[in-house]
Structures are given as C-alpha cells and as structure tokens.
C-alpha cells in the first residue's frame, strides 16, 4: 500500500523539507544583485499550509533565512512585531533596503522600546519615525531578531550612520552583559557572520571605510565579507581604531587596502585563518600605490595563524595601481595551506633580475621554493596582472613549477594551478611531471597539476587501506 507524505517519519520529512530552505550563498553576495524572494521559499510557504503537522515541521525552516526586500517588507516587519515566537526562529537575513513606510515604523518602535537601552538613541529613533529612513528600518528589524547568526546589509554608510550607533549603544552592551539567570541568551550574542555591501560600488569612487562600521564587528563575529570596503590607513585620518577583533575569516571583494591598512587588519585580528583581498579601482582621495614589500613584512610579523591567503589586483577601465616591491618569503607562515596571487608580486619578474644586475638595487628573481612555506597544500598563480607578462616570465614560471614538483621538497603540496591569458604552456610538461606521480591537464589559459595518490601492491591507495583498517577495528 503506498505511503503518503504525512505518514513518513518526521526525520525523513525534515530531511526532504530541508532541501527547500534558502541560504545566503556567498557567491551571490555582490553589488547590483536583484533582491527577490527565492522560489524555494515560496514553495516551502505553500507546503506549510497543507496541514497542521506539516506546518509545525516546516516553520523553523521557513523563517530560518529571509531576504528582507521588495514589497514583502511591510508584511514581514508586521509579522515580526506581532509574533515574537516567529522572530526567534530567524537565523539569517538579507537587508537590501529602499525607503520604507512610516506607519510600519510606528508599530515596530513600540515593540522594541525595551530593547533600546540608551535613552539618547531611543529619542533619535522617535525623531525619524515619521520620516522613513533605511538606517532606522535596519535598527528596528535587528531589534526584533534575538537569535540572528548571519547579517547581510546592502545600503550606504556615513560618519553619523545610525546602524553603527545602534551596534555601539545597543548591541555591544547586550553582548558584554552577564548571562541571564534563566539561561536565555541576550540578543546579538549568536551573531557570527556579517556581510557589508556598499550600494554605490558602481561609481567606483566611494567605499565604506571599515572604521565607520567598526562597531558592527561584535566580539561574537568571526566572519566578515565586504563588497567595496576600504581598509586603508592614511596619516590625515582622524579615527584609526586599534580595537582587537575576533575575526577568523575576512573576504574583501571589489575593495581597497593599502600596506598600512593591512598592518592594522592583521594586528587587530591575531587569530585570522582566512584573508582574501581583491582590489578594485583606487578610491577618490585614497591610495593608488600597493607597497607589497610592506605587505609581505606585515604578513610575516602578524599572520602566523593564517591558513588561506588570496591577494589579487586587476587592471581595466583605464585605471591602475602603482606596484612597489613584492611579497617575498612566506615561509614563516607555518599554518598556510592555500595560496592564490599573481606571479609578479610573489617572486618578481625576469625584468627585475635585469635591473638588479644593472645596479638599480632591485632584488633578484626569487624561486617558488624560497618563498613558499612547507605547510602549503594548494597553490594558484596568475601570470598576468597590471601589465601582460613577457614570454620569459611565463617560461620561468613553468620551469619553477616543474622544479618544485621534481625536487619533492614540499611534501604537503597536492595541487598547483597556473592561469594566464594564452595557452603557451610547455608541451613536454605533461609527460615530464608524470614520472613524479603528478598529473597535468590544461584548458584555455589554465594549467592544473595534481599529485596522484601512491598505490600499493594491492592496488589500493593508502587512505583507502587506513579507512578499511579502522572499520575492522
């Protein structure tokens, strides 16, 4: 006899329904994305109305991750105010805002008065409640979500921004407050990831200074993703925060960071495990120079716990950074497992060796083995950057990758990828590395070299034998 959906055990139903739960995928975090309600969320909402039993199972999934945007904002905000038990189920929210409706603010403000601990801040909210403002709306929504774990915000920020003030005067005191006697957690104590997107990125002339939104990075936050974030330090800056942060993962895309800013970042995040910076056009009034000599020194001095490092700068649209020096040796980074960056800022260019021999003071070309740590498992190099690499640079890189594999000095290395604008890889490279139990393949503009697992006489690789031995025990 066929089994109907309601007759299935709850564990199976929850497993099925979980595939419909939306998530805030980091790959969709970029400026200009069209805010919309995911189709799976609509399906989940329809499913929850089929029966009381299904409704009870799907409700935590339905309110787990919500895109707060578009015409649904008014109804969603009203739901949060009227049904606090549903607001407690929220774990992730995408606040992509335009102007709101004043009457909704009035309802919400009454509901959150007790959570606004600072009297001055409460008065500020009351002053703007009849003048719809995106910052005010963000504060009201956040006040209603006590169990939030992931916060994504797309809006403008300025010096007197209310969102920063809200985190400084309301959220931070709650996080630092003693635990409740009944065991319940204070709001904001579960916030682990923050994503900040500057909504003027398309102008490529403005960016959100990290020091203006510094208060949002609560002690509980371990991951920061930024789109058009400026982590630059200049002598004329009036406010340069030195507050220690608990960040373990930082991803800055379409963003800006000079050498002094990198020193500030690394010194404030002593337990940083992942650092990814993808530069874009220099900001108006910002630095147009990337001093990789100082950046390499900062990494060697402060990034001892770093496991993944990505540094990429691009050229296009008629702009360019002035590059100075190179990163140099990363051998002190004993925890580093994955590295992605351009060839020229790691080992230099063949042209540098010519200049060094002519007495210009530029250090000679480095080898990969001289600069890479023994802990490295994955290496990705781009042989193009601001200026197209010469044929000599590409040939030199091919030889260095081959020597790195042939020497077998880096025991942990498992994968090497080289990207370039053409297919000028050495034809014999694929046969040459095969004798070292490595496999090479290429597509247009990319060569991938991977280490093969060593096989025993039984035909089984070592990891498989270990797993089978553990199962027998």
Image (cartoon, helix red, strand yellow):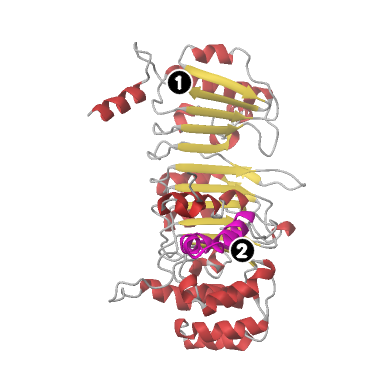
Counting from the top left corner in percent of width and height, residue 351 is at 64, 29
Determine which quarter of the picture holds residue 370.
Answer: top left
Q: Is residue 146 visible?
A: yes
Q: Is residue 139 at all visible to an observer of this figure?
A: no
Closer mark to the observer between disc 1 and disc 2: 1
Residue bearing the label numbered 1: 452
Task: Determine the residue located farthest toward the right in the rendered image.
Answer: 318
Where 66 falls versus 349 (above or below)?
below
Say which mark, if any, is on residue 46: none
Q: Which residues are magenta?
A: 39-67
Among the 4 quarters of the image, the one containing residue 213: bottom right
Residue at left offset 45%, top offset 81%:
115
Does the magenta stretch mainly form a helix, a strand or a loop? helix
Q: Quadrant of residue 124?
A: bottom right
The one nearer the camera, 411 or 355, is: 411
Image point 48% across, 88% down: which residue?
A: 119
| Mark toward the start of the polypeptide (1 vs 2) | 2
Residue 15: where, in percent of width, then height? Answer: 46, 49
Outermost residue, front direction? 1
Q: Mark 1 packing: few (<14 Cα in 10 Å), some, or many (20+)?
A: some
- Residue 412 on the magenta span: no
Estimate the x, y position of residue 118 in percent, counting from the top left. 46, 84
Q: Which quarter of the figure is the C terminus placed in?
A: top left
The residue that appears at 68% across and 26% down in the rendered structure is 444
**Could you tell me which secondary element the residue under label 2 belongs to?**
strand
Spatial CA span between label 1 and label 2: 45 Å
**Residue that label 2 marks:** 208
The crowding category of the residue bearing disc 2, from other C-alpha atoms within 10 Å (few below 14, some 14 to 19, many at least 20), is many
Q: Which of the two residues, 436 or 344, is positioned nearer the viewer here?
A: 436
Q: Secondary structure at mark 1?
A: loop
Placement of 86 over or under 262, stated as above or below: below
Seen from the viewer's position, the closer of residues 434 and 7 is 7
């Amino acid at each position: 006899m066929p089994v109907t959906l309601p007759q299935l055990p709850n564990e199976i139903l929850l497993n099925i329904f979980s595939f419909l739960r939306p998530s805030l995928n980091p790959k969709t975090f970029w400026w200009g994305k069209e805010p919309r309600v995911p189709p799976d969320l609509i399906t989940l909402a329809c499913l929850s109305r089929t029966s009381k039993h299904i409704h009870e199972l799907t409700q935590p999934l339905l309110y787990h991750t919500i895109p707060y945007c578009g015409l649904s904002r008014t109804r969603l905000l009203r739901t949060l105010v009227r049904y606090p038990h549903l607001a407690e189920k929220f774990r992730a929210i995408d606040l992509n805002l335009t102007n709101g409706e004043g009457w909704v603010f009035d309802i919400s403000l009454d509901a959150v008065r007790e959570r606004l601990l600072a009297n001055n801040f409460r008065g500020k909210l009351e002053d703007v409640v009849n003048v719809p403002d995106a910052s005010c709306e963000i504060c009201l929504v956040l006040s209603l979500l006590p169990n939030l774990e992931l916060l994504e915000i797309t809006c403008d920020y300025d010096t007197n921004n209310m969102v920063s003030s809200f985190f400084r005067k309301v959220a931070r005191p709650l996080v630092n407050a003693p635990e409740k006697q009944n065991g319940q957690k204070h709001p904001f104590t579960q916030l682990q990831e923050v994503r900040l997107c500057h909504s003027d990125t398309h102008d490529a002339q403005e960016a959100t200074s990290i020091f203006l939104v510094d208060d949002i990075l609560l002690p509980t936050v371990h991951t920061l993703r930024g789109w058009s974030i400026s982590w630059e330090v200049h002598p004329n800056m009036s406010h340069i925060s030195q507050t220690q942060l608990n960040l373990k993962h930082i991803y800055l895309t379409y963003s800006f960071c000079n050498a002094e800013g990198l020193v500030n970042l690394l010194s404030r995040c002593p337990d940083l495990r992942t650092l990814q910076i993808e530069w874009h056009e220099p900001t108006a009034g910002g630095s147009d120079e990337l001093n990789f000599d100082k950046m390499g020194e900062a990494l060697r001095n402060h990034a001892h716990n770093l496991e993944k490092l990505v540094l990429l700068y691009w050229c296009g649209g008629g702009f360019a950074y002035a590059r100075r020096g190179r990163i140099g040796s990363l051998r002190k980074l004993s925890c580093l497992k994955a590295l992605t960056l351009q060839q020229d800022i790691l080992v230099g260019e063949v042209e540098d060796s010519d200049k060094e021999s002519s007495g210009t003071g530029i250090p000679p070309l480095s080898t990969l083995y001289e600069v890479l740590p023994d802990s490295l498992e994955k290496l990705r190099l781009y042989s193009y950057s601001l200026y197209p690499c010469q044929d000599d640079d590409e040939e030199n890189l091919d030889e260095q990758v081959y020597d790195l594999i042939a020497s077998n000095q880096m025991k942990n290395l498992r994968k090497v990828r080289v990207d370039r604008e053409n297919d000028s890889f050495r034809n014999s490279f694929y046969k040459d590395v095969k004798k070292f139990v490595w496999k090479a393949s290429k597509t247009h503009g990319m060569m991938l070299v991977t280490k093969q697992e060593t096989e025993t006489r039984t035909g089984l690789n070592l990891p498989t034998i270990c797993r089978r031995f553990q199962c027998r025990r």
